[in-house]
Amino acid sequence: MKHRDVTTLFETWAKPSYAYDWDPIGYQWGNPEDECKGIVVALDLTSVVLDQAIENNANLIVTHHPTWFQPGPRP
């Protein structure tokens, strides 16, 4: 399964159309074509979450809050 497949799976449940116009959603870092080796899920990306991903050889982190946030229209 590729990272984009995980994104597609999430988007079948949490449709992008449900987000506010100013709400940044979707893939923010890396390559969506990478093969998923493991996933860490968290509220926010913190150094503890990053350490947990490294320790567990996970190469995908899914967070509720975006890495950075600035209200405004989506590009």
Image: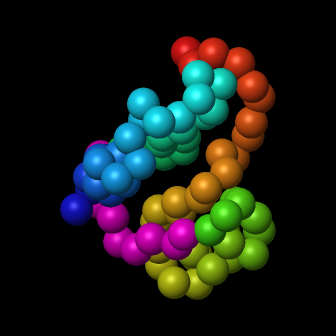
In depth, the one of 71 and 1 nearer the eye is: 71
Residue 1 shown left or right of residue 17 in the figure: left
Residue 6 shown left or right of residue 74 in the figure: left
State the residue at coordinates (68%, 72%): 49
Q: Position of residue 10 (x, y in %)?
A: 37, 54
State the residue at coordinates (66%, 46%): 66
40 in magenta: yes
Q: Quadrant of the C terminus?
A: top right
Residue 31 shown left or right of residue 67 in the figure: left
Residue interval drawn in magenta: 33-41
Q: Quadrant of the N terminus?
A: bottom left
Q: Is 11 rendered above or below residue 41?
A: above
Q: Position of residue 56 (x, y in %)?
A: 51, 84
In depth, the one of 31 and 6 nearer the eye is: 6
22 in magenta: no
In depth, the one of 48 and 62 nearer the eye is: 62
Q: Is 62 rendered above or below residue 19?
A: below
**Residue 21, picture quadrant:** top right
Asked whether residue 19 appears in the rendered view, the answer is: yes
